[in-house]
Every structure is written in C-alpha cells, then in structure tokens.
Amino acid sequence: MTRLSCRLSTLGLVIALATTENIFAADSAAYWPRFHGPNGDNISTDTGLLKEWPKDGPKLLWTAKGIGFGFAGVTMADGQIHTAGNLDDKTVVTAIDQSGRILWQAPNGEAWKGDWAGTRGTPTLDGPRVYHESPVGQVTCLDAKTGRPLWTRNILDEFGSQNIQWALAESVLVDGNRLICCPGGPQTAVVALNKMTGETVWKSPSASGDLIGYATPTLAEFQGLRMIFTMTLKALIGVNADTGELLFRVEHPTRYDVNATKPLFHDGHVFVSSGYGTTGSALYKLDVRGKTASATKVWESRELDNHHGGVVLLNGYLYGAAHNFNSGRWICLDWKTGEMKYAERGVGKGALTCADGMLYTMSEKRDVGLVPATPAAHKVVSRFKLPSGGEGPTWAHPVVRGGRLFIRHGECLYCYDVLAE
C-alpha cells in the first residue's frame, strides 16, 4: 500500500480523534487565507513580535512531516493550516491543526515529476471550501472540514493550452462568487469559474497566444474599474475582472521566459519584476477611461530582478532579492522613482515576508534573517538556520501569523514562536 493510500485509509480515524474544537479553533489571529495573505501584499498585521531572536533562533514549536514534497507555502483559517505536496504519484492537499497534526489529505490529480518535481501553488481558502491548482492544471474544490472533493477540472485540457517548462505555479484567486485561474494559450489567458460548481463564467481573449507565466494573479480596483493583473511568459497583462475583456498586454521578456513574481498594485500603478535579465523591474502607470485601460512605463530598474522570492511594498519602498544583476543581494528601491537605496548580501538570495516593521528573509539554503524594514540599511539583527530535515532549496515563501513563523522546506513544515513576551 502506498503512503497516500495509508493516509487516506486512516482519514476517518484522524477526524474521530480530533475534536471539533481542535479542527475549527476560533483563532482570528491565524487568518492567512491565500498566497501572500488577506490583502495579497505579503504583509502580516501581527504586532508585539520579537525584534531580536535568541542566538539559535526563535523557539521551534513543532515540525509537521508527511505533507509530501513541494514548494507550496501555507494558508490558514478556522484553526486549520493548508499546504500541498507530492505523495507518491499524486499532488496532495493537506490540512494540519495548530499543533502540527495532519487532519486530512486529499489528492488533486497527478504529481509533477519534471524539472524541480513537487507542488508549486498554495491552497486558497474561502469559508468552508479549499481551492488548489496543481502544477499540471488540475483545479479542485475541497470541503475544508473533511477534504471531500466538491468539483474538479483541468484548465489546460479544457481551455486548449499546454504546460510550461517548470509547470504551473499560480495560487488561484477568489473574487466574490468566482475563482480566477490562468490557463493561457491560444484560446484564452485568464478564466473565471463559478466557485461553487466550477462552471465557466467568462474567459478572456488570448494574450497574443502567450502561455501563462508562473505568477499568481492580482485583483485591484482603480477609478471604478476592477482589474486582474498577471504575467504571461512574455508580458504583463490586465483583464477586466467583471467581463474578462483583455485590457492591455505590455511586453516584459526574460531570457528563459520566467515571469514568476506576483504583480504589485498601489495608487494607480502596477509593479512587476523578473529574473534572468533583459528588463528586471518596471513600474507602470494605469490610464483608466471608462471600461478601458492602458499601462505606461514610469521607470525600470536592472538593480532588482526578482526571481520568484517575492517583493514587498512598505511605506513607499520596495524590498526583495535580486537574481543576476546584483548576484543575490537584497535590494531596496524607491516606489516612485526606482532609485536604489541599498544592495546588501544579507542571508543570501531568497524569499521574504513582512510583519511588525520587520522583514523575515530566507535564503535558498535554509538561512533565515530578521531585518528592520527601512530604506536606510539592510541590517540583519538576528539569523538562524533551518534544521537539515528538508530536501531541496528553500523556495516556499515564509508566513508570519498569530505570533508564529511558518516555513516550508521539502516535506517538512516548521512552526516557530516569534511572539514577544
């Protein structure tokens, strides 16, 4: 019997042992329902956190194993923590309680076993439902309490597209009664599904035939127009969130067609960043006229060419790790002008999140740092190294919520106490 079969065969026992209170603990502080949090900005509203860690790092509360291998991050609501990973030949979504115990596991199609095998997209939570897109395009809706499948469909097969070199990596987006996902290809770029049934509500036109990129889409409203921004392999695109109309396509090429960083929207502008040369970062100003919109470049920066570790905008400054141009240094740019404020080695190139005025930076080699979020300097006030139990690079984005720091590495999820006494 496979590991997955064993897990699923004991599902009833696991749920019987876990009380309703344990499964759905009313912990409003531990609410992070989608990739990069409730607002999609990767900034936690936690306060009262440690401004300096002990020499060996914050206290490790627990380690969850058996979640399968992958690079998916975590989301949480109603006392449950969710992630995804490869178990045997399946992509599997896992629900964990606040003590690190597995509550249920549910398959979501075939596992990705190509280059950099493992899951990418993080589950998205919406009340009693969990949504997940696998690396091969299988989109599923699960019951949050039990993991029971409610509906599933493959967006690559059904919308006439094909997978990309390193597989789909977006985390799907809930917009009211719709689920937004991006198959790309010759028939469409972005589609909206009925989140209750999976039926198609609208599909955008194709964006010049582009295959979709690796980024998670962003939803924003400006001057009365609701828009979805995402990256194809070659461009930034904007889509009308209510009708699916393609608003604009702006070229953003890279050497290996890797556009993986989630677009950032603020004050009528959209910021994008990519590694592998050519463009790096760019800020675009939106011009909205009724139901139409266009995007004009304000500035571009070769100093910050973020690979896939994410960029945070805080108090008018952008923070993220460079890829090639600055050889993995952490970069701070002025939002309005693109002026570089610093380029520092820090813990090394990787991913980040932000909480209580601090950047939580993580290298691709298990190094974790705590850095004040200020354009004056990149000062690592504390650092530690993850345990050696996980395999592969540490690519999953860290999360700080409910006074805890969650870091996914391979088949392990680590939970640290970062709350000040």
Image (tube, rainbow, N blue to C red):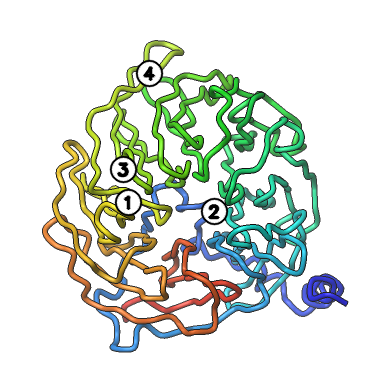
Residue type beneath disc 3: Gly
Vertical relation: 88 (above or below) 341: below
In the displayed image of the protein, which residue is found farthest to the front? 255
The foreground one among 325 and 18 is: 325
Find the distance from the CA under tag 1 to the CA under tag 3: 16 Å
User: Position of 179 compared to 223: left or right?
Assistant: right
Tag 4: Cα neighbours inside 10 Å, few (<14), some, or many (≥20)?
Answer: some
* Contact (Cβ within 8 Å) of mark 2 with mark 3: no
Find the distance from the CA under tag 3 to the CA under tag 4: 21 Å
The foreground one among 5 and 323 is: 323
- Name the residue carrying label 3: 280
Closer to viewer: mark 4 or mark 2: 4
Secondary structure at badge 2 equals loop
The structure residue drawn at horizontal position 55% and vertical position 30%, both measured from the top left corner, is: 210
Picture coordinates of residue 139, whole percent (x, y): 71, 45
Picture coordinates of residue 403, whole percent (x, y): 41, 71
The foreground one among 211 and 413 is: 211
Label 4 vs 2, first from the N-terminus: 2
User: Position of 106 compared to 397: left or right?
Assistant: right
- Name the residue carrying label 1: 312
Residue type beneath disc 4: Ser
Label 1 vs 4, first from the N-terminus: 4
Q: Residue 33's mark?
A: 2
Picture coordinates of residue 406, whole percent (x, y): 47, 70
Residue type beneath disc 2: Pro
Find the distance from the CA under tag 1 to the CA under tag 2: 18 Å
The structure residue drawn at horizontal position 31% and vertical position 78%, both measured from the top left corner, is: 420
The structure residue drawn at horizontal position 22% and vertical position 72%, both measured from the top left corner, is: 380
Work out which quarter of the rendered image holds the N terminus and state it. Answer: bottom right
Q: Residue 329's mark?
A: none
Q: How many marks overall? A: 4
- Name the residue carrying label 4: 294
